[in-house]
Image (spheres, rainbow, N blue to C red):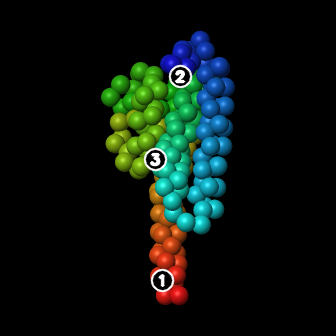
Amino acid sequence: FCFFWIQNAENAPISIAIYSLFTVFLSFIALSLLEFIFTAQRITRDVLIAATASYLIFGNIFTVFFMALEWGTYITTGGQAFVISATPEIQITWQQMVYYSYTTLTTLGYGDILPVTLVAQSFATIEAVIGVLYITILLGRLVGLYAQGEIDEVLERQK
């Protein structure tokens, strides 16, 4: 409900402040989960849930950040940081930004929502790279932990 209320142009500075605080909050949660994942000695259900949750939180972090960027661009230039290719004159909504963020994070990228400012394009690129590297690094970590667990079990049986 809060996100729908703050999407009013009269509340743009408040919107940016709330989006910024929410970005910091989500970042703290994501970093805490990553620390838990990368310090785990074994793969447990909690590690898998933390891995999934942190990936989804990254999508939310970028959603909130992109909305702050959209409002900041609107306040400073009267323009948009992101446009919907079919209707470029319409301001992007929260739901559309969630959709855009996750299609970028997963590198699916349909191309129906476009970053049009240099800053928006840069952060869209960062999100796509984070999405690919997260999956690559995390899968490597989880496979490594799983393999080590299997080796440990074989060694225990041989004793």
At numbered mark 3, what does the secondary structure look like: helix, strand or loop? helix
Q: Are marks 2 and 3 in contact (CB under 8 Å)?
A: no
Which amino acid, by three-letter code, is at mark 3? Answer: Leu
Residue 95: x, y in percent? 43, 28
First in sequence, mark 1 or 2: give its number.
2
The mark closer to the camera, 1 or 2, is 1
Task: Give the residue pinned by disc 3.
Answer: 105
At numbered mark 2, what does the secondary structure look like: helix, strand or loop? helix
First in sequence, mark 3 or 1: give its number.
3
**Which residue shows up at 48% across the image and 70% down it?**
146
Please say if 114 is above or below 148: above
89 horizontally vs 141: left or right: left
Task: Give the residue pinned by disc 1.
Answer: 157
Residue 98, by quadrant, is top left
Which amino acid, by three-letter code, is at mark 1? Answer: Arg
Q: Residues within 10 Å of mark 2 (few under 14, many from 20)?
A: some
First in sequence, mark 2 or 3: give its number.
2
**Label disc, if present, on residue 3 of the rendered structure:** 2
**Which residue shows up at 59% across the image and 12% down it?**
10
**Which residue shows up at 63% across the image and 62% down it?**
39
Between 159 and 73, the one nearer to me in the picture: 159
Q: Are marks 3 and 1 in contact (CB under 8 Å)?
A: no
Observer able to see residue 125: no
The mark closer to the camera, 2 or 3, is 2
Q: CA distance from mark 2 to mark 3?
A: 21 Å
Q: CA distance from mark 1 to mark 2?
A: 55 Å
Between 141 and 63, the one nearer to me in the picture: 141
Q: CA distance from mark 3 to mark 1?
A: 42 Å
Residue 64: x, y in percent? 55, 33
Please say if 45 is above or below 61: below
The mark closer to the camera, 3 or 1, is 1
